[in-house]
Amino acid sequence: MSTHTDHETPHGPPVRRLSEWPDERLRELAAQYGTPLYVVDRDRIAANYRRFDAAFPDARVMYAAKANTGRAVLETVLAAGGEIECAARGELRRAVAAGADPNELRYTAVNPPAADLDYAAELAADHPGLTITAGARDTFDRLAERGFDGRVAIRVNPGIGTGHHEKVATGKDAKFGVPSEELVAVANEIAAGFDLVGLHAHVGSGVLHDDLDDHCRAVSRVADLAREVETAVGELSFVDFGGGFGVPYRPETQPLALDHVADRLREAVGDLGPRVELEPGRYVAADAGTILTRVNTVKESPAATVVGVDASLATFVRPAMFDAYHPIRNVSAPDRASRPVSVGGPCCTSADVFCTDRPVAEPERGDLLAVGNTGAYGVELASRFHSQPLPGEVALRDGEAQLTREPESLDDVTAREQSR
């Protein structure tokens, strides 16, 4: 059994480090479009999806849109032969606008607002192939109230969670899924009123090699539950084991060896009649994105050298929300001597930092910094904290740039407000 490293494969290397982005091209983009700026590489999106899909030839692979719903990303996944899993009505609408066949979409409802269920039920009325996944009796009751009796899957909580942070260990969080001990009873109820076609579970997010044992235990548990459901109500079309596959944010972390992961998952699933489905999101999008930000302040203090930039936690919240590590590179002077610095934005909170006491090629005012691995949960979690306009986004294909998201103006920030 081979182990993937950073060598080239038919679908590109399994990880793209920040240093592999071309500095000169990033400087050109910042000069042309301004900062902060999201940059996404469509070629890398396609390569990541195809690599993952090739590792699981017997599975249906759907991109989890919540990682990055940008039109360029969704169009690229669809062009690569992928399908889309959505978790909200806005994601359903974006997927359809990008060219997805609604009959092939999956909607995974978690405490869905009424407007979301309305939208999904109306879409399914015209496209009966759409499948709605729910993890609560209440949600199925609400669907029935809307006259929906079509294709559904039950989300089960396997009681096993893993991933890079406790806030993403969904497999053991009561918020997500029907408790496993209630599954068969719920399946009998649901099969009487809907077309029950599948079972779904999601263990956690950011799964890497150290998490595989827990991940596979959960997969094995869900496969056993699927067999129990089939015994009780008949054959299922699929069992969806979700996504959650991680990427190496830190330079010393190795990427997942997908051939090894595939072997482990096949062993965990065992003899299972329904088709296996997987939903990578972060794996497809993370290393396809970077954020460009300009240094505006360098301040020496006894505690730290503080480097102020124009991006903030409103631009990219993962470091503040998850204490997440993201590589930072001085694109203006990558060969300058490094020194420990703390990089932070303009928000009035001490949480607005991208790194603390980290060696970076010594930044000076006006330098351009790049924050790496921001393609997943970057623009998706952006906000207007401090009334900051949302940045623009540029998509690259074969090195050519296209502005795919206009930067907001201050007028955009206040456009929907009304005076007395």
Image (cartoon, rainbow, N blue to C red):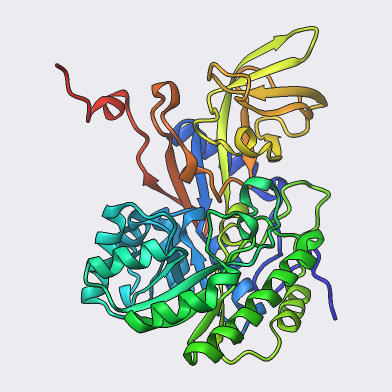
Q: Up-down: is 300 above or below 136? A: above
Q: Number of marks in the image? A: 0
Q: Up-down: is 308 above or below 283? A: above
Quadrant in which the C terminus is drawn: top left
> Which residue corresponds to the image point at 47% horizontal and 74% vertical from the top-left?
186
Quadrant in which the N terminus is drawn: bottom right
Residue 346 position within the rendered picture, expressed as x and y whole percent measured from the top left: 54, 19
| Quarter assignment of residue 49 | bottom right
Residue 397 position within the rendered picture, expressed as x and y whole percent measured from the top left: 49, 58
- Going by the image, does 93 lie left or right of 135? left
Closer to us: 71 or 361: 71
- Going by the image, does 184 lie left or right of 300? left
Q: Is residue 10 visible?
A: no
> Which residue corresponds to the image point at 47% horizontal and 67% vertical from the top-left?
77
> Which residue corresponds to the image point at 52% horizontal and 76% vertical from the top-left?
199
- Going by the image, does 14 lie left or right of 62? right
Closer to us: 57 or 151: 151
Q: Is residue 78 visible?
A: yes
Residue 28 position within the rendered picture, expressed as x and y whole percent measured from the top left: 52, 38
Closer to us: 100 or 162: 162
> Which residue corresponds to the image point at 44% horizontal and 33% vertical from the top-left?
383
Q: Up-down: is 326 above or below 346? A: below
Closer to us: 286 or 173: 173
Residue 350 position within the rendered picture, expressed as x and y whole percent measured from the top left: 63, 19
